[in-house]
Amino acid sequence: MSTTKNIMIIYGTEAYLMEEGRKKFFAAARKRSGGDAEVQTFQKDAAAATVVESFQGTSLFSSGTITVWYDCPFLPLKKGGRSRSKISKEEQWFLDEAGHLDDGNSLLFYSKGNVDTGSAFFKALKPMAEVVAAEAVTEKTVMPYVTAYLKIGAEALAATASSFCRTSFKPG
């Protein structure tokens, strides 16, 4: 996953994949900022204006800021029913401010659970952001993760081992 945008949305139920996405985003954000970026975190109940101040500001002690908003209320979890089809004035203002994010600053939305990707805010934010949908790993989807993990250490499964794993992980 190449992280070229300075906004990312990470959501899902697979903790490992969420953490991997977070690590890659932080590494790319630090590289973009040219050094050590200051990290500021906010929880669900944070005021949008406070979060905006964080990613718009500059630090005296670092070259950039990584702003993390956990469980952002603008990105609700999918609970069934219809998605919100309109953006509130506050959400629109937030999107406008995020659209002018300085190159040295980064913004991460991190939600445990399945975000409502049909909501108006998600649809408006998505073109500005990279999205990591960390869905649970199943027998059908495990092999690409095993292969990617092995590549990190410059390892690979032998053809017979790969074939064995594929056969073992097939649903019964």
Image: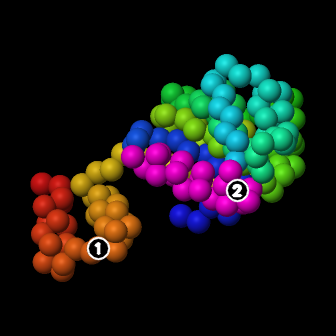
Number of numbered discs: 2
- Tell me what residue is drawn at x 53 percent, y 64 percent: 1
Return the mark for residue 138: none
The answer to which of marks 1 and 2 sits earlier in the sequence is 2
Q: Secondary structure at mark 2?
A: loop
Tell me which amino acid carries mark 2: Gly
Q: Which sits in the foreground, 103 or 88?
A: 103
Q: Residues within 10 Å of mark 1 (few under 14, many from 20)?
A: few
Picture coordinates of residue 161 (x, y %)? 15, 72
Vertical order, 3 against 50 (above or below): below
Asked if residue 5 lies left or right of residue 154, the reply is right
Q: Is 18 colored magenta in this rendering? A: yes
Question: Which region shows up in magenta?
Answer: 16-36
Return the mark for residue 35: 2
Specify the principal SS of the magenta part: helix
- Tell me what residue is drawn at x 34 percent, y 68 percent: 153
Picture coordinates of residue 80 (x, y %)? 51, 29
Picture coordinates of residue 20 (x, y %)? 46, 52
- Tell me what residue is drawn at x 55 percent, y 35 percent: 111
Label 1 or label 2, whichever lies nearer to me, is 2
Q: Is 167 colored magenta in this rendering? A: no
Tell me which amino acid carries mark 1: Glu
Whole-angstrom CA distance, mark 1 to mark 2, is: 30 Å
Image quarter for residue 145? Answer: bottom left
- Tell me what residue is drawn at x 24 percent, y 55 percent: 139
Q: Residues within 10 Å of mark 2 (few under 14, many from 20)?
A: few
Asked if residue 151 lies left or right of residue 69, the reply is left
Return the mark for residue 155: 1
Q: Which sits in the foreground, 79 or 54?
A: 54
Asked if residue 172 lies left or right of residue 83, the reply is left
Picture coordinates of residue 45 (x, y %)? 67, 19
On-image quarter of the C terminus: bottom left
